[in-house]
Amino acid sequence: MTETKKYVRILKAPNKASWYANKIGQVFEVERDGCTYLIRKGPHHLKAVRQEDAELIVTEKRPAEVGERVLITEKPVRKDYEIYEPVTVDNVNIYGVESYKNGRPIFLNHYEYEVIVNNEVKNEEADEMNKMLVDQAKTVFERKDDKYFGYKSRLGDIVIGGAYSYAFVVHYAKTNEDVVIIPGDVNTVTTPVCTTEEERLWKPEKTAQERRDEIVEQAKADVERLRTNNRLWRTFDITFDINRESRTVEAAAKKVFSRTAFYGTAICAPDDCFNIHIGEAIAIHRALGLEVPDEYLNAPQPTEVRVGDVVLVDSMKNIQELKVVDDGEYIGTGEYKAALTSIAVTKNLIRIIDDSRTEVGEWL
């Protein structure tokens, strides 16, 4: 049975003397609920929150699906997100989920969130915003399962109560303004759809692997550009020290004709996939005192195994690191390799731990 939890977000307080008067907007896990919500504030201490003063959030501990809302329950290292912040899932892979904030993708491991299954008390401001969107829209569809039903039409070209396909709604939203979709899940906010947002809302997003590929290529170009410019300007001589065992990359920027040097280090997180090119880009930015682009710090994890990758597999109950080789390459006895289509990769894969592929000339 799926584990569920309850949280409350403080919306208001009855008076200034209330213990949660200065905690508006904060989220607390519910110990028990009844006429009030009881919040644990110590080993032997519970405090009450009036139901009318809080929004109840019910969660399940399971992998999320695209479109679901999740509540961050582990303090993320990514500066854009905060613990107990609800976010919408845009992409899912075996390692976690991705969401967007301010137009930037950020990855969450599965252990860092819980899936929101019900908001029993809705935020009054969100309710008012949803009502305003529906009232002002020219056309409104309501989604039920895989169908979209006509809900409102000022233009007269939508049959109220008529069922429409996803393809029709996509085309209609792209060619008309002020179109609103009411999601089938009544606990999510109404989603405004208009021509100015069509690329974000309807165009298929790139996969996590495609974005990672782009980020790696960007990192390679960044490193080459910074090294070339410093060589031409005779500012710094840049070198790298790569340690695959410790999964670190150190950049040294040494002043020409001087003993002065500046250093920058990139350390791969234990659960992340190590990539030399991304590590070099992070390290060289730090060595030169430049701001590290967020895409390098929050690159999505790889989802496709390719020749040259180092993978972690569960083989005969033994965890092994194997390098992926082409199906036609001789593996040999005692060598830690696995063919691309071998059972180790296709069935026993735990995760990709290094996708640098520095020995492979071109990506496959």
Image (cartoon, grey):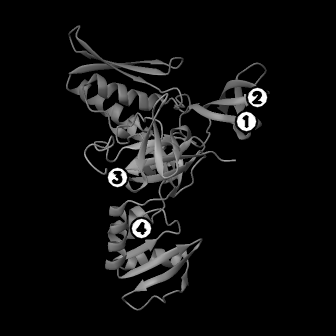
Q: Nearer the viewer, mark 2 or mark 3?
A: 3
Q: Quadrant of residue 28?
A: top left
Q: Amino acid at mark 2?
A: Ser
Disc with the residue nearer the chain's start (2 vs 4): 4
Farthest top residue in view: 259
Residue assigned mark 3: 11
In the rendering, at what x and y percent does residue 41 appear? 43, 33
> Gap in Å between the C-alphas at discs 1 and 4?
41 Å
Q: Nearer the viewer, mark 1 or mark 4?
A: 4
Residue assigned mark 2: 315
Q: Quadrant of residue 287?
A: top left
Residue assigned mark 1: 348
> Gap in Å between the C-alphas at discs 2 and 4?
47 Å
Disc with the residue nearer the chain's start (1 vs 4): 4
Q: Is residue 224 visible?
A: yes
Disc with the residue nearer the chain's start (1 vs 3): 3
Q: In front: 142, or 57? A: 57
Q: Is residue 300 visible?
A: no
